[in-house]
Amino acid sequence: MAPTTLAAASIDGGHDALLNQLDIYAVSKPWRKPHWKPPQRRNKTVKQAIDASRRDATNINTQANSGASTPFPPASGSAATPLQLNPAEASEDLSRLVLSKRMQAALSIGPKVEFEELLGAPSIHPSSKKRYCDITSQPAPYTDPKTKLRYHNREVYGYIQRLSGQDIERLLEVRKANTVLK
Amino acid sequence: MDNQENSLKSPPKNIWFLDDYPPFTGEGRQPVDASGYHRSSPEDAIVIDNGTSTVRAGWSFDKDPRLSLDPVMARYKDRKLNRMFQFVGADVYADGTARGQAKNIYEPGTNIVNNWDVQEGVLDYIFIKLGINGRDGAIDRPIVMTEPMANLVYSRRVMSEILFELYGVPSAAYGIDSLFSYNYNNGRTGLVVSSSYTSTHLVPVIDSKPVLSKASRLNWGRSQSAEHLLALMKAKYPTFPGKLNEYQMEQLVREHCYVSQDYEQEMSKYLDWTGLEDRDVVIQRPFTEAVVVEKSEEELAKVAERKRQNGLRLQAQSAKMRLDKLIRKEQDLEYYRDLQQRVAVMTKKDAKAVLEADDFDTEAQLERKIKDYEASIRKARHKDVGDIEEEAEVPVTYPLLDTPDAQLDEEGLKQKRQQRLLKANHDARARAKAEKEREKARVAEIERLDNEKRENDLEGWLQERRIARQAAIQRIKDRDRLKADLGNRKSLASQIRMKNIANLASDNPTKKRRRGNDDDTFGADDADWGIYRSIATGDGSDDDDEEDLDAGLKAIEAQLLAHDPNFTEHSTRDAQQDWTKSLLHAFQHGPWAFDKESVRDAHQLHLNVERIRVPEVVFQPSLAGLDQAGLVEIASGILTQRLAHSPHQPQVLRDIFLTGGNTLFRGFEERLRDELVAVLPAGAPLGVRRAQNPVADAWRGAARWAAGDGAKRAFVSRAEWLEKGGDYIKEHDLGNAYAS
């Protein structure tokens, strides 16, 4: 336990009283559905969340496409579902299809953009090639061939010579240049 | 290097301090404000700006948000009290444990919700503080919430699930924060540049409709700035004794950083001596001074007195003891003298018996004993009683040495041996003394010759000294280089050293045997042992050497200072290594002297080049190793390429709109304007403006929109959500697109 808690608590009950006041665990929250259970593993990193989103999208698309591009004879369609979808999913899929059609017809604000697509492209402007000293941020005409650190003048070079491997790593990490390709 | 000296600066005007953690300012809990709830009808929406730096919440009819909190929550079980605690927002800073347990809604550095439990906690907090009674077991008001541009399907699905399933809200609508802000500032057509806590977005808006397909995102915002500054500081002070964290860096970014109007130019002058005291920000971290108790004169006197008293007491004690001993010895002496007299008159046989009773073999032994006693008593008296009885410096004679052995009996031989030893001792001392005298004379002679030479041929003498000084400096340089080389495994010096070690350890050294000499002659020459000196590294390997070199140089320089009119204080090596000329010193310690011993100085941070470097990353992401185009490049790309054929392009140009906390840097607006002018066609109409309140306008815009008619058809009811899918939204002008 952090010292502040102990110290304050041992002097008087003031801190405890404050904590009791601030705590919202004990406050009743009648609006929460008591039986609701959050789905397992709903906390995802951005990468996982992107994957999950993409999976959703492809599911919808393949089902929709399969419906559109491979027309089934009306008779066989009712006899057996070719994709073996369960009825609930199929109806949802259908409703989506209808919905998206209707949306397209309505005045849309434009095609949907995916989160990853929004990411700006790498620079092609020559200014992004400017080099600055990794230590002093001054313009750096030189690069140390051994450490690959960029440096401004002789004095900084002398400083680099005295650095430990860990310090060099740290300096390179500032501009994410510490990755070693194998 | 010019010899002009930089004048020293007066001590820094301002010294800044940092909080380690957000301070807890609330005296108690935030009061529940149910007035809005009582006033609201079921039509009025709860508006939540789910921001990455701050979550704001209030009612759609409010002018300003009622609640504003950090998106953090701490929920933990206190083992001592055996109960759960849950704190949200700034409340977590009230307690050390809570602070340690605090978790953020968002994945660091992104605007994507990562921890849904915290999100629930934050929503609970909002609903509690807004005084919602939840009588029906649900939130009975619509919700308007902001979401990131091009929000992930997954994120929205989970959010909607929470809203509809957990809280049972009747309906919900989502919109994009920067578009709300633009709308609030009455923008219709323009380019929205939103640089916020975790990311920077650019999106053109035409006739109030966002063109998301032409939008772009740069993964840089204020949180990355703080992170970047932290990395810079850690690299700048690799041995900094204190702890540095991102919250401290955020304060620095907020208070001291600004956007440079001409980065390259300003940076190359940033560490110049002139005016550096104004550019350099000194931050003092807490430290504990090494305790040197300054004693007052009085106390010192007291201590001295006490010591003296103690000393006196001890002296008295020992004197008393010595006196006792002396008395005892005198008594013994008395007894032995008496014995001697008695023995003198006795017969031989009786005498022998008496002597043997007192452990004496012969009378001579008794005599010697008496002599010893006399001598020691005399000495003791001399010491204590102060009887001055100067012992004459009797030239010691060694009479027996010249007597042949044959003439001596056993006793005599013993004495002779003793005398010989004594004599050898005495002679050795005399020789050493003479040697010392001679050495003194030799040094004096050398000095005399040196002085003579100087007086006769000053120029030649000086020349000699200068050469010696150069040589000394060269030796110091060589030593430093060798030291540096030994740090590198691949250097020649290291390799030679390894070879030497291997050679020494090997049973059959590989050294070439010359002339068929098979004997190991190691050690025949004293210089052979030097090899052990040369392979030793680390502490203590050549410390003496080091001091010798430095001391030697100092001595030569002192002579030159005394006699060479051209050699001044500025020419010494120390002066030439003047810290006021050092770029690195200016970088790490500003324009003030740095005392290696001072704890205070060691706990100081100096912020200088970082002040413009950190905000510069938005314009040059490559500074932080971010492989994306900078703000201006993106903006000009959108304006001149993506919108090149749009009839609205001139209108968009006229309204470049800045919003978000990261645009609050001094000079941001001007820099963007200037750089855009430079890249746009000449004479293009350009207008750059900033939101009235770049931080709060997103919520205000959302509230205004939620209260207006435009929002009515954008709400998704629970029934619609159930029917149409987890991520379903209705498109509107301030939100994301749904259909693909």
Image (cartoon, coloured by chain):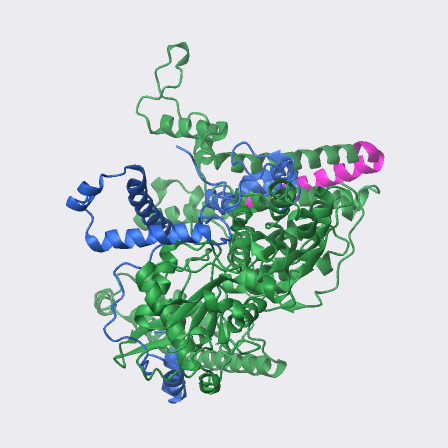
> Residue at point 50% right, 57% down?
B198
Quarter of the figure with residue B305: bottom right
> Residue at point 43% right, 60% down?
B730
Magenta region, main secondary structure: helix
Q: Position of residue B569 (x, y in %)?
A: 77, 48
The quadrant the N terminus of chain B occupies is top right
Instruction: Report the magenta residues as a range.
Output: B432-461
The residue furthest front is A75
Quarter of the figure with residue B509: top left
Please tell me the colour of chain A: blue
**Residue A4 visible in image:** no
> Residue at point 45% right, 46% down?
A116
The residue lying toward the viewer, choosing from B102 and A80, is A80
Q: On the picture, is B80 further left or further right than B281?
A: left
The residue lying toward the viewer, choosing from A96 and B121, is A96
Determine whether B579 is above or below B246 in the image.
above
The residue furthest top is B515
Please tell me the colour of chain B: green
Q: Position of residue B567 (x, y in %)?
A: 80, 42
